Structure formats: C-alpha cells, structure tokens
Image (tube, grey):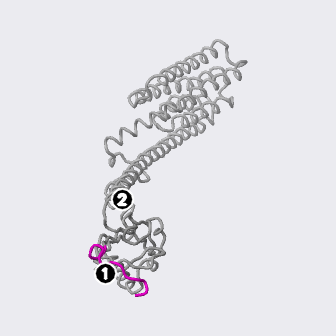
Amino acid sequence: MITELQTAISKVPRRKVRRKGLTRVEVVKLKVERAALLFRNAPVAIIVSAVNAAIVTSVAWSDIPHNVLLGWAGVVLALALLRAAVWLRVRRGSTSGRNMSRFARWHIVAMAFNGALWGSLAPIFAVHGLIGHALLPFVITGMAAAAIVSAGSSWRGSLAFNIPALTPLAAVYALAAGSDGLAIAGVVLLYGVATTLLALSMQRMVDRSILLHTKNNALFAALQRQADEAHVAEQRFRALVEASREVTIIFSPEGRITYASPSVENALGAPPELMIGLTTKAVVRDEDLPQFRAVGEKSLSQLGEVMKLDHVCMKGPGQPDYAVLSGRLTNMLYVPGVEGFVFSGVLVDGGAHSHIHAAQ
C-alpha cells in the first residue's frame, strides 16, 4: 500500500506538463478531458458569435449595403445554428470519450470557418470606406479573446479561429490604412501572437489541473483501500480476540485502556466496558508496575516486538483481589485499528492460586 501511494505521488505533474512521462492511459484521459471541456464551453462561443453578428449588423446598417451585411450575418448565424445543432445532438446522445474526441475535432474545424467569416469583415469594411471604424478592430479582437475563453482547453482551437480572423485584419490595415497601416498591422499580429501564447498557457494549466485531479483520485483510491483493509484487519482481530479465552487488553501510549476483551470479566471480575479509560496504575499492582513499564519501554524498539511477562497482577475496578496473569506485551502502536500496546495473557495455573488479596 505504501508503494502504491509513493507511485501515485511521484506521478504528480511538474510545472510544465510533458507527455514523455505519462502513461498511455493518462494521455488518452488527458485528451478526453480536454475534449469534454471544449464541449462544455462550446455554447459560449456559439452565443457570442451570434450576438456579435447582430451587433455588427445593427451598427453598420447605415454604412454597408444591406444585402452584403445581411448575407454576411446570415452565414455567421447559419454556422452558429449548425454548431448548436451538432452540440445538442451530442448532448442528447452518448458522451463517451470517443464522441467527445470527435466533437472536439469538428468544433475546431467549425471555429476555423467562423474565424474566416469574421476575418472577411475587414475587407468588407475596407471596400466601403470604413477601415477607420472603431467597431472593426474592437469586434474582431474581442472575438479572438472569446475564442480563448471558450476553447481554453485547446490552444489549437484558439489558433484555428485567430489565424483566419486576424490575418485579413492585419493585411487590410497594412494595405489600406495609410502611413499608420503597417504599425497597426504589426500591433494586430502581435496581438495574435500574444493570444496564441496565452491559449497555450491556458491549455497547460488545464492539463495540470486534469492530471492533478487524476492523481488525487488515485491517492484517494489508495487511501480508501488502505482504510478498508485496516477495517477488515480490525474486525478480524476483534473476532479472534473475542472468541479466545485469553485476556486481551490494549493500552494506549499514555497508558490508558482502549480495549478489553470479554474474557476480562471472568479473569478480573469486571465487565470490559468498565475497564475502558482506566490507567495502568489503576489496573496493575504497584509492585508489578516497574516491570510492566520496563517491558513496554523495551518493546518500543521495534514494531511487533513481543515481550514476555511471566508474572503480573491485575484487578478490575472495585475488586479486592488481584488476578495473577502470565502473558506477553506486544508493540502494535502503528497498526491501524490497534495503535497501542497489546497485553495477552491467561490466569496462572488456569485459575488455581490465581488471586492475591490487595493487602498482600
């Protein structure tokens, strides 16, 4: 179990995710989780595209011929409806890893077409003398930023939109914006590079998050198995102890009784529940305390160390006589479900001459 935990911890990803150190299963899981995130964020990209198309149409209505503007907006909205239909079909069907991967590939292609449509807005504005309109760079760069948000789990998705959307904008500014055109085109290209790097950084963050989640699940599963095994071991231990005639008492590291077997009542004259919480001093005779403690201290040297106690006198609460027991003390401090010193013993001579009055 410890080896499993160490293996899980050792695979926690470093700052930069590298596939070289991942197993095939982890790589597949990474791809599927990325695709699932892209699927969940797809409605954001679809809605933003449709809403921005309506805004552009309303703002440029008086400056661009209606047939051109409505034709462009109609294609953008048609693509948005198609993307929405595909998304709904996948949502209603199977959300298996294979379907998520297929959707991711299709969605990235759709983002490229959508980017081309938004990129075509630049020459449309330029042809109609609107190259200096503030709406043009604002809406296209805003769509590029929205692509990063909606496709944060896939930098290729952001790139698929940004290249066809920003390249025509930069070209139009370089060719038709006069003396400042080249500078503006350079700023647009720089913006494209910056957004691409940001998209790549976001994907790495998403990858780390997915892998950390996977490792956390592995750690939790290992801990859960360990807890289940400890519980089973404890139940087995209690079943064996309670079926035995031996007196079994567990002392905590502080010297208090945390468990007493049913056979304690026959040997010490007190039910097990009354023994819980009593100290070593209250149970063991004063003359035997040094020996009892010395054996306990000696057993600390090694987990599972067993020390013999040939003669120790114990009594239950309210009992006038000590019972003379012979047994062993075992260090089980680090055993889950026990976590203490376990005394196991029997009455000396099976009961004959097994009691000493407290006054003796």
Label 2, secondary structure: give it: helix
| Image quadrant occupied by the C terminus | bottom left
Looking at the picture, does residue 205 appear above or below residue 303?
A: above
Q: What's the amino acid at mark 2? A: Arg
Q: Position of residue 323 (x, y in %)?
A: 36, 77
Q: Contact (CB < 8 A) between labels 2 and 1?
A: no
Looking at the picture, does residue 260 appear above or below residue 166?
A: below
The quarter of the picture where residue 177 lies is: top right
Residue 292 located within the stretch drawn in magenta = no
| Image quadrant occupied by the N terminus | bottom left
Q: Bounds of the magenta span?
A: 347-360
Residue 355 located within the stretch drawn in magenta = yes
Q: What's the amino acid at mark 1? A: His
Q: Position of residue 241 (x, y in %)?
A: 33, 62
Question: Which residue sits furthest top?
Answer: 67
Residue at 36% across, 58% down? 234
Q: Position of residue 89 (x, y in %)?
A: 48, 20
| Separation of residues labelled 2 and 1 (CA atoms) | 25 Å
The quarter of the picture where residue 59 lies is: top right
- Label for residue 311? 1
- Label for residue 238? 2
- Looking at the image, residue 297 sits to the left or right of residue 88; the answer is left
Residue at 37% across, 51% down? 225
For disc 2, the neighbor class at 10 Å (few under 14, some 14 to 19, many from 20) is some
Label 1, secondary structure: give it: strand
The quarter of the picture where residue 288 lies is: bottom left
